[in-house]
Structures are given as C-alpha cells and as structure tokens.
Amino acid sequence: MGTDSKVAIITGASQGIGEGLVRGYLARGYRVVANSRSIRPDAYEGDTLAVAGDITDPAVAERVVGVAVEKFGRVDTLVNNAGVFVPAPFTEYTEDDYARVVSLNLGGFFHVTQRAIKHMLARGGGGHVVNLTTTLVGQPVKGVPSALTSLTKGGLDAVTRSLAIEYADRGIRVNAVAPGNIRTPMHPPETLAALAAMHPLGRMGEVSEIVEAVLYLESAGFVTGETLHVDGGAHAGRW
Ligand SMILES: NC(=O)c1ccc[n+]([C@@H]2O[C@H](COP(=O)([O-])OP(=O)(O)OC[C@H]3O[C@@H](n4cnc5c(N)ncnc54)[C@H](OP(=O)(O)O)[C@@H]3O)[C@@H](O)[C@H]2O)c1
C-alpha cells in the first residue's frame, strides 16, 4: 500500500453511486476510506478501509476521519454521498420523516465535513469536498413532491458555495453534483420507466455518469463553488 498517494473519504459507499465512487477513486490511484452503516470490512479490494457506522453520529464522523488520518496519514477529498430521498406531499410528512431526512442529508454532511476540513487546514490547506445534491433543488416537479429534499439538499447546495468562498484562500475547493434520476438500488424497478421520462434526454442516468462528473471536479483545479448538473437536461427548463 503506497503512503504518498491521495486519500478520499466516501460516505454511503456500500451500493449505488457510492460504490461507483469508491471504484472510480481507486482507479485514479487514490486510497479510499469507505463508510456506510452496513459496509463489510472486505467490501472492496485494494487500498481501502471500510468504516461501518451511521454518519449522522458525530462519533462515527470522528472515527471515519480519524481512521483516514491514522491509517493513511491524510485526507485529500471528502465525498458526501450518503443521502435519503423521502417523497411525500408536504402535509403528510411525519416527525420521523423530518428527523430522518434532516439528520442524514444535513447532519451526515455537517459532522464529517467539519472534521475533514479541520484536518485539511491542519495539514496546511488544500483539499476537495464534493456534495451530492439533486436537480430537484433548482427544478421541483409537481408530480414528485419532496419538500424535505429541497429543504436539505437545498442547504447542501447553498453551503457548497458558502464553504467554497470561506476556504478558497486555503486551497480547499468545494463543489456539488446534482443528479437527475440515476439507476441505483434507491429506485424500485417498477418506477424506472416513469423516472426515465423525467429527463429531456429521455432516459435515466447511470452511476458511471455521476462518477465521471465527480472525477471531473476532482481534477478541475480552477473550479470551486460549482453545482454540476448531471440530469439529462432537466435543470435547463421545461420541455
Ligand atoms: N439515485 C438517484 O436517482 C439520485 C438522484 C439525486 C440525488 N441522489 C443522491 O445521490 C446520493 C447517492 O444516492 P444512491 O441512489 O446511490 O443511494 P442508495 O442506493 O440509496 O445508497 C445510499 C447509500 O448510503 C448509505 N447510507 C444510508 N444511510 C446512511 C447513514 N445514516 N450513514 C452512512 N451511510 C448511510 C447506504 O448504505 P447503508 O444502508 O449500509 O448505510 C448506501 O450505501 C444520495 O445523496 C442521493 O440523495 C441520488
């Protein structure tokens, strides 16, 4: 295991986009700390460490960053990928829905990002944070009511620009990727046709297309505070 290669932390890494991101960063020569609640120690081969735990818990966030620093010596990139989607009419959301969505989509970002940036600053600056938002933030859809998504992923979208400005002079870039509907286990098979029709390009997106976008941002040294839409054109308007 090399000791000078870069290190990426990826949350929500047991399946879907997170799994694609782990493989994408490994293929780029990064060492990867992969977190999810159920991730197995042997989930990935190669330069990876799996840290199981609920990323909404500050102690888990501490452990994730701590393991990266102790075992790999550094944190270069954090991808805040763990997230949950609970569509419902606004008045039908329960207290449990509210607590679950806020704690993961916001708390799951806050605790680990704070710790990762602290480490980046302590190392002398430099680093990259990528947040997974959704195209629904800028382009809500009448047939998919999901105010809790707007509330939380909209916060992530805003804080992407806020942290980009706060830390640009320390060499830390902060970007976001806003996916449309991507074919992952998040979506039951019977919904796929309807989800495909929600994009001007007329199909769902693939995990590899989100991974490409995140890796583009990784190498785009002059890009920060950007939300890159990977949504088949859905953010561009009505069609
Ligand atoms: N797929 C889409 O169409 C789509 C569209 C727009 C935005 N996004 C965003 O993209 C991201 C990834 O989506 P996806 O479709 O790949 O999701 P997914 O298939 O549902 O996977 C979610 C991942 O997050 C982990 N996770 C859930 N709760 C967690 C917690 N409390 N702590 C740590 N890990 C947790 C899950 O593993 P465990 O169960 O082991 O914890 C799993 O690895 C999310 O932020 C989502 O909002 C997705």
Image (cartoon, rainbow, N blue to C red):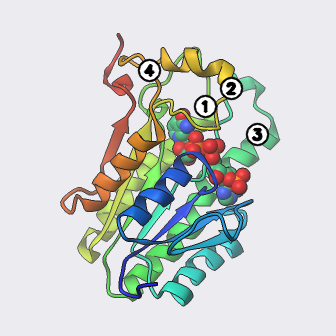
Q: Are the residues at dot 2 and dot 1 in contact (C-beta closer than 8 Å)?
A: yes
Of the residues shown, which amino acid type is indicated by label 3?
Answer: Asp
- Residue corresponding to mark 3: 97
Of the residues shown, which amino acid type is indicated by label 4?
Answer: Arg
- Residue corresponding to mark 4: 203
Indicate left or right for 171 with 72 as reference. left
- Residue corresponding to mark 1: 147
Q: Quick one: SS at disc 1?
A: helix
Q: Is residue 63 above or below residue 53?
A: below
Quarter of the rendering containing residue 228: top left
Instruction: Choose the circle earlier in sequence order: 4 or 1.
Output: 1
Of the residues shown, which amino acid type is indicated by label 2?
Answer: Phe
Q: Is residue 151 visible?
A: no
Marks 2 and 4 sit apart, C-alpha to C-alpha, by 28 Å
Instruction: Choose the circle earlier in sequence order: 1 or 3.
Output: 3
Quarter of the rendering containing residue 35: bottom right
Determine the residue positioned at 49% across, 74% down. Answer: 116
Q: Nearer the viewer, mark 4 or mark 1?
A: 4
Residue 62 drawn at (x, y percent) = 63, 78
Determine the residue positioned at 48% across, 50% down. Answer: 156
Q: Are the residues at dot 2 and dot 3 in contact (C-beta closer than 8 Å)?
A: no
Marks 2 and 3 sit apart, C-alpha to C-alpha, by 11 Å
Label 4 Cα neighbours within 10 Å, binned few <14 / some 14-19 / many ≥20? many
Question: Does the numbered disc 3 mark a residue whose Cβ is under 8 Å from ligand 1?
Answer: no
